[in-house]
Image (cartoon, rainbow, N blue to C red):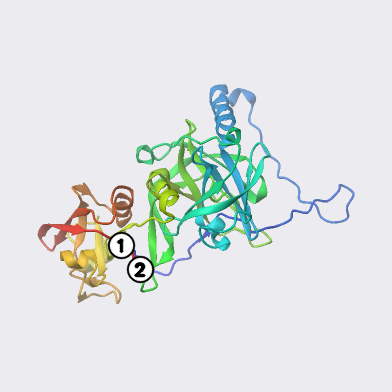
Amino acid sequence: MKKKVTLAILTLALAALACQTPSFAATQSPDSSLPVEVAPTVQVSDASDVNPAEQETLVTLFENVSPGTVAIFTDSGQGSGFVFDDQGHIVTNFHVVENVSNPGEPVDVVEVRFSSGFMVFGSIVGIDTDSDLAVIKVDAPAAELKPLPLGDSSLLKVGQTVVAIGNPFGLESTMTVGIISALGRTLDSQRSSPDGALFSAGDIIQTDAAINPGNSGGPLFNIYGEVIGINRAIRTTNFTDTGEPVNSGIGFAISINIVKRVVPVLIQTGNYDYPFLGISSSSALSLDAVNALGLKQYTGAYVTSVVPNGPADKAGIKAGTTPTNYPTLLAGGDLIVAIDGREVRTFDEMLAYLITNKGPGDTVVLTVLRGEERVDVPVKLDKRP
């Protein structure tokens, strides 16, 4: 869980899940008296500016991977997904199928459409509300099951080219291109803690590749055609006439390294347990807040609260108790600066390390600053309650 301290009231963009509710696009004939939406004029660069090698790379990538991407339809919406293995398991977002209920539902509730035109009903075999993942099982001919290769999201760098393929606004097998805009972001989980606060989903990739309603659950590829993320949400202030969010260049995808840990367990057991540390933290503190807290450095995850009897509490991690000029910010808490010897600059970095490398029952060593003292604290992780 995470709380952030802000010093002013800001106008924030809305983070919207990139799935789509059912809609019917009306088209009008040229002689209709009703208004017709006209596509905007596109300025095409001179052909000499186009790099033929880059263009051919993208063409080849689409031809190779599109058979492994699918469109997903339920009674309440639509999204995207991809073939995970040759046993018929399809990976998508939980929020794409959340209204279908729980694993074990009848096979006639989720429709999966392949790029070849083949269609089949599937059933949900596992869900993960923490990272917003779901697995669907379909009975399809072997010729239709084209598992996509999985990359390694730990090797990603900001600026690398990425490609999204999905079902935006019901337009199946749509490909968009962009770059990795940032790494290690967090989003709110789809699941609440016992005290009502939302857990955090971590290790999120930010991209400017166009992601719109219907893209949810679809794959995000690197330039080599490996899946490096699953498109989950966008942040925007723009909406269509029907209230659907419109891409504004800020999209988010679940890292594939999380998927590689979670999905095999979902297939086997139907659910996945995440490691639980039991703290709330403020990262990215303002300079005034750093000074008010008396911190000796600007980076790290400052502990604002500790869950009673949780792993961190049992290990002796301390939250702030001394009032400051900020009503919600108490001084005297630990500042986590490293985990297992790895530098922690933000809470987001620490969370990404935990969920991609650790599980319940594992022990981590938190290095904390307590005033002038630097202390190593072993913490045995539990599972999220």
The quarter in which the N terminus is drawn is bottom left
Instruction: Return the mark for residue 286.
Output: 1
Q: Is residue 385 above or below residue 179?
A: below
Q: Is residue 166 left or right of residue 15?
A: right
- Could you tell me residue 63's position as x and y percent? 59, 30
Q: Residues within 10 Å of mark 1 (few under 14, many from 20)?
A: few
Q: CA distance from mark 2 to mark 1?
A: 8 Å
- Could you tell me residue 257's position as x and y percent? 38, 44
The quarter in which the C terminus is drawn is bottom left
Q: Residues within 10 Å of mark 2 (few under 14, many from 20)?
A: few
Q: In the structure shown, which secondary structural element does the residue marked by tag 2 occupy? A: loop
Q: Quadrant of residue 327?
A: bottom left
Instruction: Return the mark for residue 7.
Output: 2
Q: Amino acid at mark 2?
A: Leu
Q: Nearer the viewer, residue 286 or 237?
A: 237
- Could you tell me residue 306's position as x and y percent? 25, 69
The mark total stands at: 2
Q: Nearer the viewer, residue 131 or 280?
A: 131
Which residue is rendered at x = 63% and y = 30% of the image? 45
Q: Is residue 41 left or right of residue 245?
A: right
Q: Amino acid at mark 1?
A: Ser
